[in-house]
Image: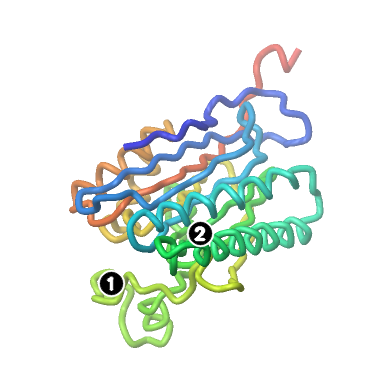
């Protein structure tokens, strides 16, 4: 299990301009039980001292040899680097535009790399991103890596998979449960870096205190149900313990693929006694 070298989980009070919300963020990746390589990557940027301003990127690569690892790492870093330049942007429409531009840049970077050598030919990656500013979250996704929002009562899948089985579910050909065990469940219909153009989907969400965002690769959702994810997420306040327990559960259930998870917990800022004086 590889722990992110960039964990933000030490909120402090008095962050000017960010209302009464603070965040705790943690990400980890694990090779799982069946794979020889870990082709997942993630990036966490911002969130200084619990400030609700930052970006999380998660990517699940594909390709021969280590090409999938190269694709996911390049894509996650490229998008994160680009979005860090726009943290001062206030216009929500421009934030989405900046996310689209960052993804286009990452796609071009990976695609050009795939054309540069035989060992990288055909490589690509999924991608799911969360751009947090105050209580507003802008999500983007390509492929079947997902974003969820969970609380004590429910769990909501924000993103829609770009996959063969998701299209079958949307047509009513199979049920959601049948999709989890379908032989074509790993076939995606969109990926970053496989062509010179990529089409991402974008979603807006307004978070409330007590809610938790979960970004994950399919190594989690292949083996752990959404209700199990919700139960683990809401049973602990320590975000790194949540991530560890989700990874442990996926491995207990077979560890069929690489498992990568980023958790973002939104909490109400607690005022100190000094602040009331």
> Where residue 75 appears, x then y in whole percent?
54, 54
Residue at image coords 41%, 46%: 261
| Quarter where residue 8 is shown | top right
> Where residue 14 appears, x then y in whole percent?
72, 24
Check disc 1 and report its element: helix, strand or loop.
helix
- The residue mark sitting in front, 1 or 2, is 2
Q: Could you say which is closer to the camera, residue 258 or residue 66?
A: 66
Q: Could you say which is closer to the camera, residue 51 or residue 195?
A: 195
**Residue at label 2?**
127
In the displayed structure, does residue 194 sit left or right of residue 275?
Answer: left
Task: Relative to 31, say whether 64 is above or below.
Answer: below
> Where residue 93 appears, x then y in whole percent?
77, 61
Quarter of the image that includes the C terminus: top right
Residue at image coords 69%, 43%: 84
Task: Relative to 14, say whether 212 is above or below.
Answer: below
**Residue at label 1?**
177
Q: Could you say which is closer to the camera, residue 165 or residue 57?
A: 57
């Amino acid at each position: 299990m590889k722990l992110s070298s960039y964990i933000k989980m030490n909120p402090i009070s008095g962050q000017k301009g960010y209302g009464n919300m603070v965040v705790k963020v943690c990400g980890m990746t694990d090779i799982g039980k069946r794979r020889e390589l870990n082709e997942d990557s993630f990036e966490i940027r911002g969130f200084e001292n619990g400030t609700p301003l930052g970006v999380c990127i998660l990517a699940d690569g594909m390709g021969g040899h280590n090409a999938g690892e190269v694709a996911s790492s390049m894509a996650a870093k490229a998008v994160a680097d680009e979005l860090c330049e726009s943290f001062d942007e206030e216009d929500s429409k421009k934030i989405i535009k900046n996310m689209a531009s960052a993804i286009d840049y990452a796609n071009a970077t990976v695609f050009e790399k795939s054309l540069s050598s035989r060992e990288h030919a055909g490589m690509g990656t999924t991608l799911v991103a969360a751009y947090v500013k105050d209580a507003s979250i802008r999500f983007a996704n390509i492929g079947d890596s997902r974003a969820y929002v969970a609380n004590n009562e429910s769990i909501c899948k924000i993103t829609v998979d770009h996959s063969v089985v998701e299209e079958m579910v949307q047509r009513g050909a199979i049920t959601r449960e049948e999709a989890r065990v379908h032989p074509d469940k790993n076939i995606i219909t969109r990926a970053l870096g496989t062509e010179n153009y990529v089409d991402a989907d974008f979603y807006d969400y307004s978070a409330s205190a007590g809610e938790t965002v979960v970004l994950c690769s399919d190594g989690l959702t292949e083996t752990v149900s959404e209700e199990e994810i919700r139960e683990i997420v809401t049973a602990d306040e320590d975000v790194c313990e949540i991530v560890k327990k989700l990874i442990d559960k996926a491995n207990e259930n077979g560890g069929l693929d690489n498992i990568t998870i980023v958790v973002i917990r939104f909490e109400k800022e607690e005022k100190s006694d000094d602040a009331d004086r």
